[in-house]
Image (cartoon, rainbow, N blue to C red):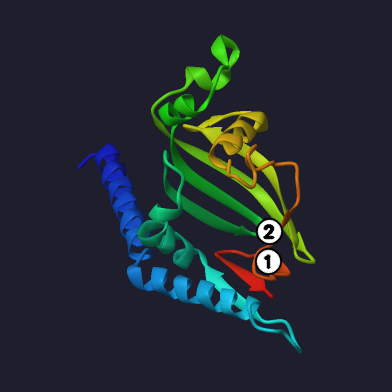
Amino acid sequence: MSKRTLIAIGVSVLVAAAASLHAATQSRQAADALSQKIAAISQRAATPRGGQPASVTLTEDELNSWFVYRSARYLPAGVSKPSVTLMGAGTLKGVATLDLGAVAKRRSGGGALDPLSYLGGKVPVTVTGTLQTRGGTGRFDVQSTEIAGIPVPSFLLQELLSIYGASPEQPEGVRLDESFALPANIQRIDVGLGQMVVVQ
């Protein structure tokens, strides 16, 4: 057996093992566990507080399991397969597949000078950044954005958020450069390696 064949077999085994491990970390049980934690956070927000702050730990496996088994009804049309990697020190990476054809239908105008008009199909969008929270407010500072593995400037991400984040309350969508109020009386969220701690 040649050295090249051994290397190919080794790489195949590693890829298969990684795929099995990834699949094994996503489960309905983990999704249910996160749903129960979200319910507890909501219930605590509706109850008068006193004494020490309460904290709940959400794991990366729970978050990604919830995305797989529970998130479909909450996602905007054209968004699918979300996942998150909690990298520690406040840093996280989010990935989702966007249907850029749906983006084109939602946009009015733009023309040949619109960079999004040159993109199409379903593509992965990856955003890496740092979540900073304090005193019930948060801010997400984007470090990098990729569309289909190609680095793009943050203004393209802002365009996508303006489209997908639009609502009656926020007709212009989500703004990257603005702080936001944390829901459910959450005071801060500490992003660690593989987990985040929600403090109420």
How far apart marks 2 and 1 lie (CA) works out to 6 Å
Picture quadrant of residue 33: bottom left
Quadrant of the image for the C terminus?
Answer: bottom right
Say what amino acid the circle numbered 1 marks. Answer: Asp
Residue 50 drawn above or below residue 86? below
Left or right, 62 with reference to 166:
left
Q: Position of residue 118 (x, y in %)?
A: 49, 17
Point out which mark residue 107 bears.
Answer: none
* Residue at the (55%, 10%) spot, across then down: 112
Say what amino acid the circle numbered 2 marks. Answer: Gly
Residue 117 drawn above or below residue 72? above
> How crowded is the residue under tag 1: few (<14 C-alpha within 10 Å), some, or many (20+)?
some
Nearest to the observer: residue 85 or residue 133: 133
Q: Position of residue 46 (x, y in %)?
A: 63, 78
Q: Secondary structure at mark 2?
A: loop
- The residue that disc 1 covers is 190
Whether pointer 2 and pointer 1 mark residues with C-beta atoms closer than 8 Å, the reply is yes
* Residue at the (65%, 64%) spot, across then down: 183
Looking at this view, name the residue that lies furthest to the bottom.
51
Picture quadrant of residue 68: bottom left
Looking at this view, name the residue that lies furthest to the top.
112
The answer to which of marks 2 and 1 sits earlier in the sequence is 2
Q: Secondary structure at mark 1?
A: strand
Quadrant of the image for the N terminus?
Answer: top left
Q: Position of residue 146 (x, y in %)?
A: 55, 34
* Residue at the (53%, 41%) spot, across then down: 126
Q: Position of residue 131 (x, y in %)?
A: 69, 55
Looking at this view, name the residue that lies furthest to the front.
168
- The residue that disc 2 covers is 90
Left or right, 54 with reference to 115:
right
